[in-house]
Amino acid sequence: MRKRLFGLLLVCCMVVLSLAACKKANDEKFYIGGIGPLTEGAAVYGTHVYWGAQIAVDEINEAGGINGALIEFKFEDDVHDPEKAVNAYNSLKDWGMKILMGTVTTKPCIAVAEETKADNMFQLTPSGSSPDCIKYDNAFQVCFTDPNQGSASAKYIGEKGLASKIAVIYNSSDSYSSGIYETFAKEAENQPFEIVAAEAFTDDNKSDFSVQLQKAKEAGAELVFLPIYAQEASLLLTQAEARDYKPIFFGCDGLDGILTIENFDTSLAEGVMLLTPFAADATDEKTQSFVKKFKDAHGEIPNQFAADAYDAIYIIKAAIEKAGVKPDMSISDMCDKLVKVMTEISVDGLTGAGMTWEATGEVNKAPMAVVIKDGTYVSAE
Amino acid sequence: MTETWRKFSKSTRINTITVGIIILIYVLCQIMISAGMMSYLMKGLLMQFCYYGILAVSLNLTVGILGELSLGHAGFMCIGAFTSAFFSKYMVDIIKNTFLRFSLAIIIGAVSAAVFGVIIGVVVLRVRGDYLAIVTLAFGEIVKNVINALHIGFDSRGFHIALEAGKLELLEGGRMIIDGSQGIIGTPRDSTFTIGVIFLILTYIIIANLINSRSGRAIMAIRDNRIAAESVGIDITKFKILAFTISATLAGVAGVIYSHNITTLESSKFGYNMSIMILVFVVLGGIGNIRGSMIAAVILTLLPEYLRFLKNYRMLIYAVVLIVMMIFNWSPACINWRKEHSIKGAVCRLTKKISKTKKEA
């Protein structure tokens, strides 16, 4: 009896708390929410998106806001889990969010897209790369879709003649990784190189890559394509070094962030190439000021995710200005107006000049390869 | 009124109270939702309370009543989730009636989980104790990894199954249903809070009745003393498999509700972390205490969400709270303290005092 009473009491307290948390949104500011993993395995992406977006928000607010209205920005953790992402989305809605900049990772993004569709909320994902993330009209992307990344990588390797024998090591239990591998393999048929080994691993045994590396080495691969995340890649590179196997390693945007992995000897990543639209060493003023601000605030070099998020905030700003949206509009009205102008605007950002959008939500910008040199990302051209 | 109430057996009274509480909370929630008083977060969480509640109650049957440690409960949930989502996704254009489609989905999910429950039960229940825990753990991982590798699609020629995406070779107009690690995307969102609550109550009634039935007593006899149970002629294998299968079936139902509440379904979600989480619900709520596991499921689902303001320290605090709650609930010193300071005890003492003074007067 007592225990039940205690339990009930706790539940009641929490219900009351949840009510107390209900706040009417301020009508004078733009409430923009962000969702991404800030803890556990994929935290490096979420954290950089959070920091990158925060810099953009601070810049805009310092300059007087959008059409005179300031931005209020809040970022919630989703632990890279669809269920938690939807919870985060709901809790942001309680806070008063009217525009969503997120989510960072693909799977949660697909689940949240369903929610934004139901609420007709404008959604711009900085890095959710599956086509399913943007299958509804209200969602747009800043990054490339997975299929594009796979085929763009294959084309890049083919055109530059980087290698003739290629091995692929990918995570078959991860949708991002297997998605890229599939399109890469398809495009490879049209390219002048040959895939000599395609080795898979899963989330459950992603710490030992000796078998995969051995096979790649035996097959004589000159280039190993790694459509995987940085955490695994850091282990893989360490193990490749240990067995004295030194091919070219080529990855996609998931490899971005490898230099900030803890306890990873960054000299091992020397010469690793990755297809990403952002290089922190670019000499243009915009990138340099962004990198400087990021470094001063957090002591790390921003990766592509941070740049995507920074751009995302400016893209939202451009769309709001073009559409003449006011902060006191309803979520749905705001969304309708923003969606309409998304195909009309063109934004010069860190991750590409003159970015434009299709009605499908896909972005048009040129892919670029960077190579890691002396511990930083340098453009490969 | 009190007379008829007293006539019921103690277990009937407890069960009625519990179901009453669930219905009361449900009605309260509905009123709050229609009055627009409920936060979006709570609205989203209500469904999760239901399926985690069902999972906790069903695992309590294996762990608390049957007395066997199972670490593969998420595996059964996974089977229920995937078979039903597969069905719903395939049938979404064929059966337009949501109620009919979802009813069939629940039956399919429950039956397939039950079938696996029997198959696994026959094999697994030959071992006991720690060994059983390890075998169930392995089972959960097998289910997860097999589904992770499955690619199933269909076109005009029928269904195609492959272990590699490229080998499916669907014709023009064909559709992929289970896409390996990407799982099932786009399951229709058929489950609602009402359905969730109905199944939570159903689960409670099924388990509560089982415990108080002849079979339930047999199952508990096996738990308490296997040799004694065997010597009085209880068919141990039969009752073990019975309990195990019911537990698996209900987990399958929870899986169905889960998969129809969120549009993306991936097998990696159902790893041993999930199984352990359900076990934590059961242990915190009290092994063998059905109502307790429901309350624990609700609290432990709420907690991480309400600790969001702590940012990255959230999970750390969550762990600390978990330890504190475990100690508060189960340490003998705390139990004694609670006995001395309980509201019920205070009320009892007060009334006793009053009646005493009355008598003296």
Image (tube, helix red, strand yellow):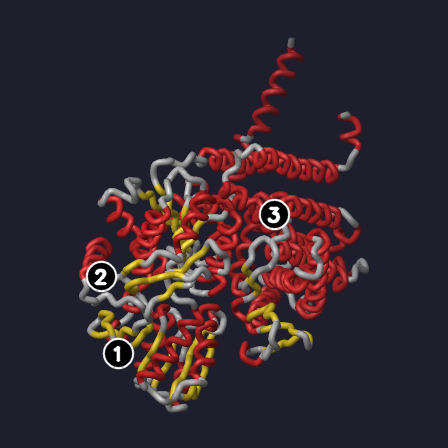
Q: Chain of mark 3?
A: B
Q: Between tags 2 and 3, which lies in front? A: 2
The residue wearing badge 3 is B50
The earlier-in-sequence mark between 2 and 1 is: 1
Q: Residue furthest front?
A: A344
| Residue ID for mark 2 | A287
In which quadrant will I find the C terminus of chain B? top right
Residue placed farthest to the right in the image?
B233
Q: Label 1, label 3: how many angstroms apart (C-alpha)?
A: 52 Å
| Contact (Cβ within 8 Å) of mark 2 with mark 1 | no
The reply to whether label 1 and label 3 mark residues of one chain is: no
- Type of residue at label 1? Gly
User: Callout 2, which amino acid?
Assistant: Thr
Q: Residue B307 appears at what percent x and percent y?
A: 42, 44
Please tell me whether mark 3 sits on a helix, a strand or a loop. Answer: helix
Q: Within 10 angstroms of label 2, few (less than 14), some, or many (20 or more) residues?
A: some
Label 2 in the same subunit as label 3: no
Q: Which residue is mark 1?
A: A271
Q: How many neighbours does mark 1 have within 10 angstroms: few (below 14), some (14-19), or many (20 or more)?
A: many
Contact between marks 1 and 3 (CB within 8 A): the answer is: no
Check the residue under mark 1 and report the chain it is in: A
